[in-house]
Structure formats: structure tokens, C-alpha cells
């Protein structure tokens, strides 16, 4: 009897490793033959050593060249014909659109579309030509197709219902990609005289980097010893990304320590007190669930994806998008109220255990496969 076969389709290999690797490892343990179609940025060998089959699929995350986009769909059709997957698990909106279109031209597989966030064109009020094109492609790809969609927050799920993509499809809510609560766990942190603040993210303007910088300046006027860390890399393929020159210019003289890309996020969080994440819109940010699991108080924005990670006044604070002044006020409140800071940290850990654990996400996802 043939083993069940799963094909993960993801935009880039590093994103797969950071967000879906535990799911693929578990699939292999459960007897699935695992294949991955993605863009190779140099991580293929790492994945092949784990026993996965890799297929090069160039997906330009910000691409607008119609010929290149068409070629990507044709290449994906060929990959599906080679793999003959029992299940195709697509990750991100663009990949889900292209793979769902490709599925019209190959044998039937169970299609799981994981909408990890609606991305740049759905942030704020961007009513662009690109957004209109995306809507048209979504309508062609998704309407009444018998697919299963995984959403990370109820706002995105409701948007799909309003677009009537629930007709003939199944919409499911699973909060994020999950966090390993045995790796991301509280430390015996020694609370300083002033709290240590951290923001972990790609260096995108939509993540609220400017608001974090501006708020830090306000905090430092009252508490010059406060520590601020920024961890994450430039993302050259994202329209909202800073250039290195832009970011360094904005950070100049602020005292914020920009660490760039790091592989020791768990340790960085264990040595911090508060996660500050003033993003404009998210699916469900990995930064916040990792911070919660590590027992940090959280200050984030009252917006799609972020609000799911904070119970106001319990494990953190929610502030309006773009409000650096209130952001700074909440930072100062946690500097001045150490009891509240510790209480919120403990509440974050409990929330992570109850809502965001990797084990929970894996079991709910496999229930959909089966």
C-alpha cells in the first residue's frame, strides 16, 4: 500500500523552515512522503538531509511580471504531476491562489490553503490596481472548489465569508503556526531598574518600526537607562521593507540596538521583559506567540492578528495603530509597575500554553489532513 503523500507549497525555503518545519517532520513520522515546492535561497540541502523531496519553484513574492507568474503556475502543475500528492498544503495567499489554479489541471488532491495573513495589499486602506487583480484571481481560484482554508485570526476568516468564499469550501480557524513551549519558556529573569524592551520582526515599515523608534525616544527622556532591542533582517523583496541605509538613518542617535538576523530569539526573549509589536496588520505574528510563551508582557496594536495575542490589561496592552505617544505611555507604565510587569508575564505564558502551543496546532492540522 502506497504511503500518503503531502506536498507543501511555500514562497521561500527559509519561511518554511521558520514556520512549517515541525509540521513536515511530524508528517514524516506519521508515514507521509513529504515533498516541498519552494524558492531555493540556499536552504535546500538542510531540508533534504531531513528526508524531504525538494522541488525548485521560483515564486516572486512581490512579482508583477505576468509572464513569470504564468511560468510559476505551469511549473507547479508539472511538480504536482510528478508528486501525485494526497494532500497539497499551500502557505500564504499568493501561493494558495497559484496552487489552487494549478489544481484545475491535475488529478484531485485534498487542498489545504493556509492563509497566514493577507499581506501588503490588505494593510490599511490600500485600494490599488494590484488589490483588484488579487481579488479577481481569488475569485477564479477559490469559488466553490471544495478546498479547506486555515485562517490565523477571525478577521481574515470573516473577510473570506463576506467575499462568499465559504460557499463550497471549508473555513477553519487555527491560531498561528504554533510555538514550541519547551524551547520558548520563561527564564529566571532578573528584573532591572528599567524594563528591557524588544521587537523581533523583519524590518518592514508595516511592522511599526518607526512607532517603536519614536516611542523609545519618549521613554528615554524620562528613563534614559531603558534598554531597547530590534532583532530582524531587511526583506528586500517586500515593498514595505526598509533599506539598510533608511533604517540606520532612523536609528541614528536613538540608542536602540539593531541586532539584524538572529538565530537565538528564545535567548533574546528570555533576557527581555516586554515585547513591543506595533504592527499595522498581521495573520497571527510568530513574534507575539514566542514572546507570550517566554513569559513577556506584550504591548501591541489593536488590529487584525495582533489583538488575538493580548487580553487587555491581563497579559499586555493594546494601543491604536500609529500611536507612538500611547505606546510610550504603556512602556513607562510597565517600567514603573514591576508587580504588573511580572503578573502580565505569567499571564502570557498561560495564554501561550492554552492557545498557541505547537502540539495543539499540529493535532488540529492533521485532523484536516485525515
Image (cartoon, rainbow, N blue to C red):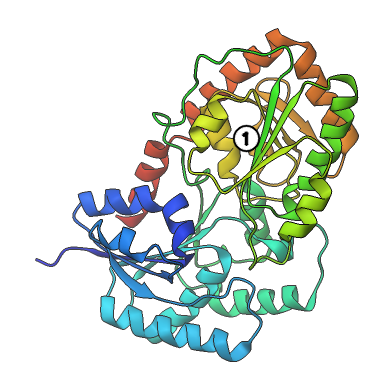
In the figure, is residue 336 to the left or right of 258?
A: right
x and y percentages locating residue 287 in the rendered image:
59, 40
Residue closest to the eye, 173 or 127: 127
Residue 42 seen from this side: yes
Mark 1 packing: few (<14 Cα in 10 Å), some, or many (20+)? Answer: many
- In the rendered image, the residue lying farthest to the front is 253
Residue 242 seen from this side: no
Residue at 37 percent of width and 37 percent of height: 359
Residue closest to the eye, 167 or 320: 320
- In the rendered image, the residue lying farthest to the left is 1
x and y percentages locating residue 210 in the rendered image:
81, 46
- In the rendered image, the residue lying farthest to the bottom is 67
- Which quadrant would residue 105 be assigned to in this image? bottom left
Residue closest to the eye, 171 or 215: 215
- In the rendered image, the residue lying farthest to the top is 339
Residue closest to the eye, 213 or 345: 213
- Which quadrant would residue 69 be assigned to in this image? bottom right
Quarter of the N terminus within the rendering: bottom left
Residue at 69 percent of width and 8 percent of height: 339
Residue position marked by numbered label 1 in the rendering: 309
- Which quadrant would residue 65 be assigned to in this image? bottom right
Quarter of the C terminus within the rendering: bottom left
Q: Secondary structure at mark 1?
A: helix
Residue at 53 percent of width and 25 percent of height: 270
Residue at 49 percent of width and 80 percent of height: 101
x and y percentages locating residue 75 in the rendered image:
42, 85
x and y percentages locating residue 113 in the rendered image:
48, 63
Q: How many marks?
A: 1
Amino acid at each position: 500500500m502506497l504511503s500518503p503523500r503531502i506536498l507543501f507549497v511555500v514562497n521561500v525555503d527559509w519561511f518554511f523552515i521558520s514556520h512549517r518545519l515541525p509540521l513536515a517532520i511530524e508528517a514524516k513520522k506519521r508515514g507521509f512522503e513529504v515533498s516541498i515546492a519552494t524558492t531555493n535561497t540556499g536552504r535546500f540541502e538542510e531540508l533534504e538531509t531531513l528526508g524531504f523531496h525538494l522541488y525548485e519553484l521560483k515564486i516572486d513574492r512581490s512579482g508583477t511580471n505576468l509572464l513569470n507568474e504564468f511560468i510559476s503556475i505551469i511549473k507547479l502543475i508539472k511538480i504536482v504531476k510528478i508528486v501525485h500528492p494526497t494532500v497539497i498544503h499551500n502557505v500564504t495567499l499568493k501561493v494558495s491562489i497559484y496552487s489552487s489554479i494549478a489544481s484545475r489541471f491535475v488529478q484531485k488532491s485534498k487542498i489545504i490553503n493556509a492563509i497566514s495573513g493577507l499581506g501588503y495589499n490588505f494593510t490599511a486602506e490600500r485600494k490599488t490596481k494590484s488589490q483588484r487583480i488579487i481579488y479577481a484571481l481569488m475569485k477564479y481560484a477559490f469559488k466553490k472548489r471544495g478546498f479547506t482554508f486555515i485562517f490565523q485570526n477571525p478577521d481574515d476568516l470573516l473577510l473570506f465569508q463576506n467575499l462568499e468564499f465559504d460557499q463550497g469550501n471549508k473555513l477553519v480557524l487555527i491560531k498561528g503556526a504554533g510555538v514550541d513551549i519547551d524551547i520558548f519558556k520563561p527564564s529566571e529573569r532578573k528584573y532591572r531598574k528599567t524594563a528591557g524592551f524588544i521587537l523581533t520582526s523583519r524590518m518592514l515599515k508595516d511592522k511599526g518600526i518607526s512607532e517603536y523608534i519614536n516611542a523609545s525616544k519618549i521613554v528615554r527622556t524620562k528613563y534614559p537607562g531603558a534598554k531597547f532591542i530590534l532583532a530582524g533582517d531587511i526583506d528586500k523583496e517586500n515593498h514595505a521593507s526598509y533599506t539598510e541605509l533608511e533604517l540606520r538613518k532612523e536609528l541614528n542617535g536613538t540608542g536602540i540596538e539593531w541586532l539584524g538576523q538572529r538565530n537565538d530569539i528564545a535567548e533574546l526573549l528570555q533576557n527581555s521583559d516586554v515585547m513591543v509589536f506595533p504592527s499595522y496588520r498581521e495573520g497571527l505574528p510568530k513574534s507575539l506567540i514566542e514572546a507570550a510563551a517566554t513569559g513577556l508582557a506584550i504591548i501591541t496594536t489593536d488590529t487584525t492578528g495582533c489583538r488575538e495575542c493580548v487580553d487587555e490589561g491581563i497579559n499586555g496592552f493594546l494601543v491604536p495603530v500609529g500611536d507612538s505617544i500611547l505606546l510610550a505611555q504603556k512602556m513607562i507604565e510597565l517600567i514603573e509597575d514591576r508587580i504588573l510587569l511580572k503578573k502580565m508575564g505569567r499571564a502570557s505564558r498561560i495564554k501561550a500554553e492554552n492557545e498557541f502551543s505547537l502540539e495543539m496546532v499540529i493535532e488540529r492540522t492533521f485532523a484536516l489532513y485525515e
